[in-house]
Amino acid sequence: MKPLAIKQLFYTALLLFSIACIITACTKKDFPHTYVNVSGSDSAAVALDSLPSFNSPAGIAVDAAGNLYVTDYGNNLIRKITPAGVVSTLAGSGNDGNINATGILASFNGPTGITVDASGNLFVADAGNNLIREITSAGVVTTIAGSDSTGFVNGLDTASTFFTPTGITVDGSDNLYVADAGNNAIRKITSGGVVSTFAANDTTLNSKVPTFKNPTSIAMDVAGNLYVANYLDNTILKVNPAAAISIYAGTGLQGAANGPAGSATFYYPNSVALDKAGNLYVSDGVNNLIRKITPAGVVSTLAGSGVSGAADSTGTAASFNGPAGLAVDAAGNVYVADSDNNMIRKISPTGVVTTVAGSGLSGSKNGLAVARRNKTRVINASKRVFNLFYKPKTK
């Protein structure tokens, strides 16, 4: 067997093992009745199990009106959070499946990446089903690409196949780009439903072109360049419109070093998002950090102490626990699917971190989220050893 084939087999086996661990671990459990102080008051308290809840939120997108959409991975749901803080289920029954229908009659299987187009249509990387799904603003779910089998076949809509698609973005012409993690490729889906391979690994043994190693997230700038979280390689890759691949940031070594992009380090970066100024934000999952890369190539830590937690504060005084999907609104606020905390967090342009929604308990409750700042609260929720994006940090 060729060396490249052996490596591909290893990465594929690792990805499948991670998914299997999730399916086993992400079961709903009952938790103690815990209380949290809200709105900065020491006297006002709200029962956590009365607040909206999530189960390993994996991806997040924001539309022009400020609505947030969350792929609630452990619940197999697509959730919506209005600017007023009302959490609801837009689509999904909660049971794993691939049924196309409206609202809660539809089903998903481990949805991960999510993006929204200019018309308000959502597109979901339904990783467990190896499908790409579309959800209209009315909640109508359809399959636009992929079949019920794993593979690497291009073609028209459901004649194509994917292998654990985890990241997705859309351009101004309504073309979709998919981080096809299991195939180590970036796939393109035209507005007409034609699936092709936009970029993939060079199979030449002596090639010096950077390679994809489980790409898990993707974002596009105004010039049409793609930025990819190259998860297992601890790097951020850039793919230009001609599909040329280069390393944008990271040495490939595990770490949390800031500085010039060429010497900075990450530890299994899983998600990326861009703001309108061209700054790239990275969920540095195992490091529990949100990193920022300027257009000049300077890497810094936007928020997170590096220690797992759920503290709301400013910059490195705040904490996360397995941060996953990212989205940036027009005002420059960064939203984080804080997966292992079962929360949705917000980082202002000045680095102030607050909790938008999520009690911290694992669940699927809808309702009005209470604005609050977590200070020293301990999360009484189960911690998943594996997540789709994460590998455990070794000592």
Image (tube, rainbow, N blue to C red):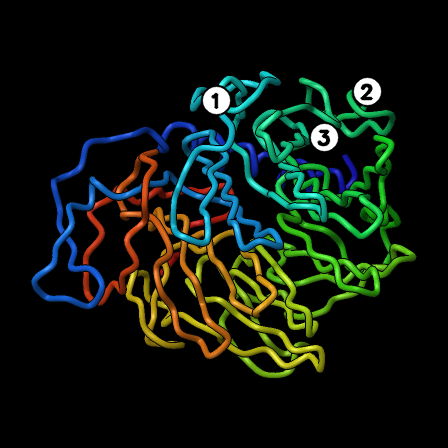
**Residue type highlighted by circle 2:** Ala
User: What quarter of the picture does the C terminus occupy?
Assistant: bottom left
| Helix, strand or loop at mark 2 | helix
Viewer-nearest of discs 3 and 2: 2
List the residue tagged with mark 1.
104
Q: Is residue 145 above or below residue 298?
A: above
Marker disc for residue 159: 2
Q: Position of residue 129 (x, y in %)?
A: 60, 25
| Dots 1, 3 in contact, CB < 8 A | no
Viewer-nearest of discs 1 and 3: 1
User: What's the distance in space between the residues labelled 1 and 2, CA to CA?
Assistant: 26 Å
Marker disc for residue 162: 3
Q: Is residue 369 visible?
A: yes
Which of the 4 image quarters holds residue 130?
Answer: top right
Instruction: Say few, some or many: other residues with alpha carbon within 10 Å of mark 2 (under 14 / 14 to 19 / 20 or more).
Output: some
Comes first in the chain, label 1 or label 3: 1
Horizontal side of 248 relative to 293 (left or right) equals right
